[in-house]
Image: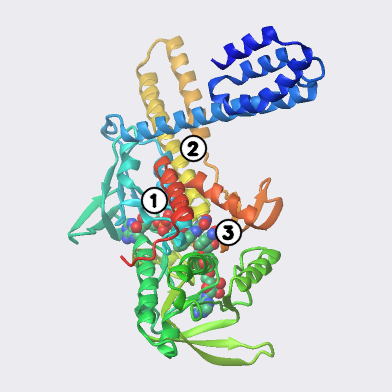
Amino acid sequence: MLSRSIYRQRLMLTSPQQAALAKSLSPIISKQANALTRRQLSSTQSRLAPPGVGPSSSDKKSWGFWKTLWRLTYTSLIVATAVTGYSIYETRHPQDQVPPAPGKKTLVILGTGWGSVSLLKKIDASEYNIIVVSPRNFFLFTPLLPSCTTGTVEHRSIMEPVRNIIRNKENSVTYYEAEATSVDYDNHKLTIQDAVNHSEKVLDYDYLVIGVGAQNSTFGIPGVEQNACFLKEIPDAQKIRKKIMDCIESASFLDLDDEERKRFLHTVVVGGGPTGVEFAAELQDFFEEDLKKWIPEIAKDFKVTLVEALPNVLPSFSKQLIQYTENTMKAEQITVMTKTMVKKVDEKNIYAEVTKADGSKEMMVLPYGLLVWATGNSTRPVTRDLLSRVASQRGSRRGLLVNEYLVVEGTSDVWALGDCTATKYAPTAQVAAQQGVYLAGLFNQLARAEDIESEVNKLESLAKTTTNDSDRKAVLAEMEAKARKLRRTRSLLPFEYSHQGSLAYIGSDKAVADLTFWGDTSNFATGGQLTYLFWRSAYISMVFSTRNRLLVIMDWLKVKIFGRDVSRE
Ligand code: FAD
Ligand code: NAD
């Protein structure tokens, strides 16, 4: 319609009128852009305009740039939607699985954490009869667990059912929701206990991989086990989320000048490692962005204290980031107490020893409503059982000693990975995941070596029964070639860790990052709001599945739009 009327007018107009019309058309054109394509508009404008009024070559260039950008954007959007859609379709419609061929060796994998799941993802399941044993029937993306304590992310968004993981393998894998209780190395037997009914079962294995992780350390400090909340698993995060609201509602019940009210509103976080720092930051954000708004009467007394025994928080990060983190936390009103070692805890108070600047020590009492204990890892009972059974493991307190191929020292056919091991590496998801990938490669290689070995054996028997000289020579040559291949396949490389860097959230939309490039040769330390965007994009790209990715993005959007939920479940 518009283009026709423009055409009609064009026939009747003289030059000055053309210029005036070309100018006056611009706003009309932009208003009616949906009725006319941009290409039609630009050609109509340039046909109408006299020389000098039409787009210059620089205008054309910039228009060309925006056109290309727009095309790139919508093409990427279409491709991203198609890839996401296909990936969702694929995971929702798994193919029929075939069981591994009879006679395959039984590989038992303990745990469904970072180490075991990355092994499971990469292993060729046609080569083994795989059995996974874990009391937790899902994989947990731990880096976003602190966000679950305040509802920034919902806990189901960072859980991936193990059934989805194993059902999407080409060959069938068995899963038992059970806990391994003891291992009989000599006889290759493993006792497991059903996580619900507690009935027991004994499994025979050819190969065993232990990836049972670690539990929270309390260093035997009196009262911690009974009174503190921990932050390792989903129920821990749920308990903290409930307890935050319990404390606030209990405080609101009391008179404003009541000391007990202040106690309820005081959260103490013990341990200034990444877990403690990230939780304290998340809680302070919750208070600043939501709690203060909906329950203003708590604003004056709400307080978060972070207690650390060492002279600074985040000891594994670079110096400037430590300083930046401490300054940021101070600005956020989080009280950071360093050189403060907690010695005892009771129902209402924490007793800590503070080392003063002159080196003298002083005991202080911190009343608390919520205590979150994040002082690192200790060994699980099943790991301790293993440590006590193998003579060469007995001195180890941090975890299982493994060699450079991750074989548990003092055993054969048993490997271990992740937080349950004592190695030169920090107990992180990065290390566990890389070890899982390494072990998958190792098992795939072992299976290939076994296949080649059986071919060599067959050729050997054939050579013995072949009487014709030239045929025999050919068989022997083939056998020699296979034997060389076997030697190459059997020569395994030791595990090597490649550190990609460390990230931590420190509150008020800021994060710190210690990044490593070119195989540990170059470091880059950065902190702030841009780093926080990087932190978010890194974790979004790392979460287990497309489903997790979409759920986490929706949670973040939901919190941006509506704020966090302050109801108590
Ligand atoms: P886990 O992931 O802990 O898995 C252990 C598995 O073994 C679980 O499935 C468990 O149910 C199972 N299991 C336990 N007992 C038994 C048994 N008896 N028999 C069979 N199975 C058993 N690291 C990073 O690199 N970056 C981060 O940002 C980061 N953030 C973290 C945030 C938090 C809050 C926490 C707690 C840790 C974080 N970590 C991070 C550390 C990281 O989560 C661990 O290093 C990693 O989970 C170790 O992997 P894993 O496979 O050894 O053990
Ligand atoms: P951690 O071992 O890193 O830190 C625990 C801290 O608690 C230590 O600094 C220690 O000095 C302190 N502490 C111990 N006893 C104390 C006491 N009695 N009083 C006061 N302070 C005490 O533990 P974590 O933060 O739970 O981390 C465990 C592992 O998980 C680490 O390897 C860590 O790197 C990894 N992790 C990484 C991230 C991340 O990269 N964002 C997040 C969480 C955990």
**x, y percent for residue 100:** 29, 33
Q: In which quarter of the image is the C terminus?
A: bottom left
Which residue is the site of mark 2? 490
Q: Residue 336 carries which label?
A: none
| Labels 2 and 1: the sequence-earlier one | 1
> Disc 2 versus disc 1: distance between alpha carbons?
41 Å
Q: Which of marks 2 and 3 is in front?
A: 3
Location of residue 359 with respect to 212 vertically, above or below: below
Q: Residue at x 60, y 60 (%)?
A: 510
Q: Earlier in the sequence, mark 2 or mark 3?
A: 2
Dot 1 lies on which element?
helix
- Label 1 or label 3, whichever comes before in sequence order: 1
Please give left or right for residue 314 compared with residue 401 in the image.
right
Disc 1 from disc 3: Cα separation: 20 Å
Q: Which residue is located at x 43 percent, y 37 percent? A: 444
Q: Dot 3 lies on which element?
A: loop
Numbered badge on residue 157: 1
Sort mark 2 into few (<14), some (14-19) or many (20+) by Cα contacts within 10 Å.
Answer: some
Q: Which amino acid does label 2 sit on?
A: Arg
Element at label 2: helix
Q: Please name which of the two marks, 2 or 1, marks the residue nearer to the observer.
A: 1
Three-letter code, disc 1: Ser
Give the spatial CA distance, label 2 vs label 3: 50 Å
For the residue pair 156 and 178, the one nearer the viewer reads as 156
Q: Counting other residues with Cα less than 10 Å from the Cα at mark 3, is it few (<14), some (14-19), or many (20 or more)? A: some
Q: Which amino acid does label 3 sit on?
A: Asp
In-image side of 510 versus 164 (left or right): right
Across and down, in percent, residue 140 comes to 40, 53
Number of callouts in the render?
3
- Residue appearing at x 75%, y 16% in the figure: 17
Q: Name the residue beneath numbered marker 3.
A: 509
